[in-house]
Image (cartoon, grey):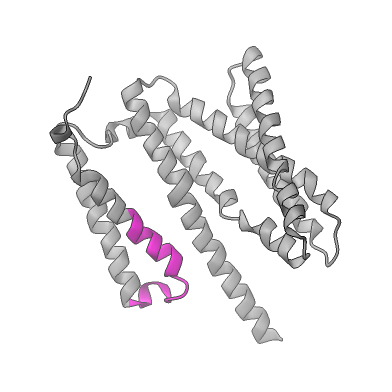
């Protein structure tokens, strides 16, 4: 069914954008500005709370809401949002390999070659999911394998830290990274879509995208940055 332009709730996406941009400012500059001790961070936090409350209130009263909040009553949608939020733990560390290879002074050609291996891992993950769903509809094992792949990727990188290391040692972590990403995307996406219509699936997808691409990485990125800063400060004091 076509919806005329005057039937679209234009104010809701503006409120959502204002809230998310303010939240992003808090996460990005909180450490630099000393969090809520800063007037700018306080204002940004208020700039998140007020538009967010107005956005929620508007979705509950307008005839055609921008996002159907009733979708959050579904157990599978809430579970999917939680899992995709946890995936932000790994997305927030995406710069580790880049920092690692910069320290090792790899040239641009080597870095480009290493960045191809996550693609190989994604292909392997896609094939694995195809073969899996031909025999089983269970999603929990795929989610577990996805998280294990990502965790193993980080563990291997941790033990690889060394002044000198051959690029070949970075191949397996790269494949595991792509494998974990694909397994989690597919399994969480299918779990979120169970029992939904096309209309409600759009609202569900919006929440997943927000938590996967924005809220999760921003939150855990700020958490990592804060811990890194504290670690540098403590060790610098000890030295």
Q: Quadrant of the N terminus?
A: top left
Q: Tell me the magenta residue range.
A: 20-38
Instruction: Give the answer, above or below, for where 1 lies relative to 78.
Output: above
**Magenta-colored segment: predominant secondary structure:** helix
Number of marks in the rendered image: 0
In the rendered image, residue 145, in percent from the top left (x then y), is placed at: 67, 34
Q: Is residue 106 magenta?
A: no
In the rendered image, residue 9, in percent from the top left (x then y), is placed at: 19, 39
In the rendered image, residue 179, in percent from the top left (x then y), is placed at: 68, 36
Q: Is residue 32 magenta?
A: yes
Query: What residue is shown at x 50% (from left), y 30% (from top)?
Result: 189
Instruction: Give the answer, above or below, for where 50 lies relative to 67.
Output: below
Residue 202, quarter of the rendered image? top left
Q: Quadrant of the C terminus?
A: bottom right
Residue 100, quarter of the rendered image? bottom right
Q: Nearer the viewer, residue 113 or 179?
A: 113
Task: Answer left or right for 90 relative to 61.
Answer: right
Task: Answer left or right for 213 relative to 177.
Answer: left
Query: What residue is shown at x 68% (from left), y 18% (from top)?
Result: 131
Q: Residue furthest front?
A: 109
Q: Nearer the viewer, residue 89 or 108?
A: 108
Query: What residue is shown at x 52% (from left), y 59% (from top)?
Result: 221
In the rendered image, residue 63, in percent from the top left (x then y), is placed at: 14, 32
Query: What residue is shown at x 62% (from left), y 58% (from top)?
Result: 95
Q: Nearer the viewer, residue 177 or 54?
A: 177
Residue 159, quarter of the rendered image? bottom right
């Amino acid at each position: 069914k076509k919806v005329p332009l005057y039937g679209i709730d234009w104010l809701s996406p503006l409120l959502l954008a204002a809230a998310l941009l303010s939240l992003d400012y808090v996460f990005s500059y909180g450490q630099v500005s000393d969090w809520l001790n800063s007037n700018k961070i306080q204002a940004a936090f208020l700039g998140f709370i007020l538009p967010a409350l107005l956005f929620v209130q508007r979705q509950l009263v307008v005839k055609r809401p921008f996002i159907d909040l009733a979708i959050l009553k579904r157990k599978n949608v809430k579970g999917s949002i939680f899992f995709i939020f946890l995936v932000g733990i790994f997305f927030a560390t995406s710069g580790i390999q880049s920092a690692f290879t910069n320290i090792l002074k790899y040239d641009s050609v080597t870095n480009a070659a290493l960045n191809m291996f996550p693609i190989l891992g994604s292909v392997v993950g896609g094939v694995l999911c195809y073969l899996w769903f031909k025999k089983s509809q269970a999603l929990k094992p795929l989610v577990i394998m996805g998280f294990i792949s990502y965790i193993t990727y980080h563990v291997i990188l941790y033990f690889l830290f060394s002044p000198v290391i051959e690029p070949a040692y970075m191949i397996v972590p790269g494949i595991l990274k792509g494998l974990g990403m694909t397994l989690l995307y597919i399994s969480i996406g299918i779990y979120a879509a169970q029992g939904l219509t096309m209309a409600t699936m759009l609202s569900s997808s919006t929440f997943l995208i927000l938590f996967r691409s924005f809220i999760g990485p921003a939150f855990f990125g700020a958490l990592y940055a804060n811990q890194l800063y504290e670690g540098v400060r403590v060790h610098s004091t000890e030295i």
